[in-house]
Image: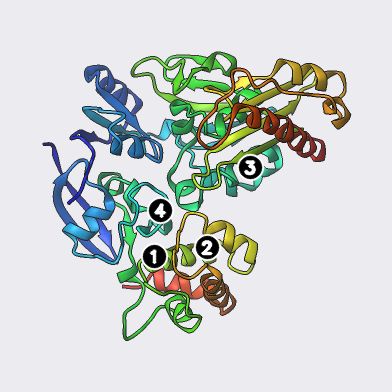
Amino acid sequence: MPTLNITLAVNGQVQSHEVEARTLLVHYLRDHCGLTGSHVGCDTTQCGCCTVHLDGRAIKSCTVLAAQAQGAEITTIEGIGSVERLHPLQDAFRRHHALQCGFCTPGMVMQGIDIVRRGRGGDEAAVRHDLEGNLCRCTGYQNIVDAIMDYAGGAAGDAAVAVEGRR
Amino acid sequence: MSNAMIDFGYVRPRSVAEAAKLLADEPEAKVLAGGQSLIPILKQRLARPSLLVDVQALDAMRGIEIDDSHVRLGAFTRHAEVAANARIAEALPALAHMARGIAHPQVRHMGTIGGSLAHNDPGADYPAAVLGLGATIVTDRRRIAADEFFTGLFDTALAAGELLLQIEFPRHRRSGYCKIPHPASGLVNTGVWITRLGDGVRVAVNGASPCVFRHGELEQRLAAHFDPASLDDFQQPAQGLNADMHTSAEYRAQLVAVAARRALSMALSH
């Protein structure tokens, strides 16, 4: 069983673990880094619950090998805010009641930040289009769209860049 | 840890020569580009490679070059790069439009044009652009015309261990593409690409059959008159089209006609 030493930066901290070559990034994050905020919902590139940022871009960590991310910078839901100090988009999710069970929320938030980073957060149709790869089975999406657009409206572009570069 | 994939090794070569040697030495090795088709296939154990050769570090597969006559894309160009590139949008607007609609944003951030073409999934978008524009596939061994490249379901003219380096698109701005995607998977159910050339028309149909194909009748009709009226009495036979739990062959035949009209409308707008 071939193993590799995979070294990458997760939320600004260097992580280095010996893993099987076939290890998916989401399992590297959950099982080896202990960061269980990225969820495995479908394991088939559909639900988006495992969405994290790889070098600043949203990707599905169930469909990327940890080895592909060797040397990259990863940001997970744990890296953007805390219970004491929510990321502005997390705060918008709370205010808009954009979550119910919460399982999809880490992926929705990471995708929402990416949508706003790409300058598409001000257009409802664009937000809905860009949430195509994220499934929520509780809320019906309306409040998620509202939260992302609210965040986009509040100088969020600058905030997102600042938060991504933090730590 | 749950993992349905079989064991394999992983290497990230630094040069085309190194990658080619790895592939030559290991007959069960497979090229890994963005992985957005390959990794799902590995999970389903439809592929069982001994070694994945990750080509992300190969400079020869990178870069977007645009001159007066061609748009050249490195094979590792990701869908999101094509979608966001203003110069591609100017030179080949239908190609930029296509890239913006592939799967969803997270997949577009990883998936590459070379990976899509080498995989040749009937539900993929890019094969229609390559065939419809009459692009040229450049490998580490030769140049392959689009008409020779797509050989069948999940099959191409690429030989074992041959590396797809670049795609060379002629700049035919008057092109249009329309796909009807599967609403859940986003894969192409039925799509049509139409390009007006100086001396004729090329029409490529994807999704509807096991492999992307050129549509002779539509090409003839549109070469006579590049006008929606040329399609008024067009009827696509259902014979030979895909039929599955989502869509019958008869319905796909209807969609070919619908997508052709919409693709023509886009081509006429450019």
Q: Would residue B39 be found to the left or right of residue B110 on screen?
A: left
Q: What's the chain of the residue with tag 3?
A: B
Q: Which is more toward the observer, A54 or B61?
A: A54
Q: Position of residue A8 (x, y in %)?
A: 25, 55
- Amino acid under label 1? Cys
* Residue B173 in view, yes or no: no
Q: CA distance from mark 4 to mark 3?
A: 20 Å
Q: Secondary structure at mark 4?
A: strand
Marks 4, 1: nearer the viewer: 1
Q: What label does residue B164 carry, if any?
A: none
Residue under label 3, please give it.
Answer: B96
| Amino acid type, residue under disc 3 in the picture | Ala
Determine the CA span between mark 4 and mark 1: 15 Å
- Asked which colour scheme the image uses, the reply is rainbow
In the displayed structure, A68 sits above or below B141; it is below
Check disc 2: other Cα within 10 Å, few if <14, some if 14-19, many if 20+. Answer: many
Q: Which percent across, then down, holds residue B25? A: 22, 18
Looking at the rendered structure, whether the residues under marks 2 and 4 are on a common chain is answered as: yes
The mark found on residue A115 in the picture is 2
Local packing at callout 4 (Cα closer than 10 Å; few below 14, some 14-19, many 20+) is many
Question: Does residue B141 appear to the left or right of A33 in the view shown?
Answer: right
Q: Are marks 2 and 1 on the same chain?
A: yes
Q: Tell me, yes or no, whether the two marked residues, 3 and 2, touch with CB atoms within 8 Å.
A: no
Q: Disc 4 marks which residue?
A: A59
Nearer to us in this view, B87 or A45: A45
Sequence-first disc among 2 and 1: 1
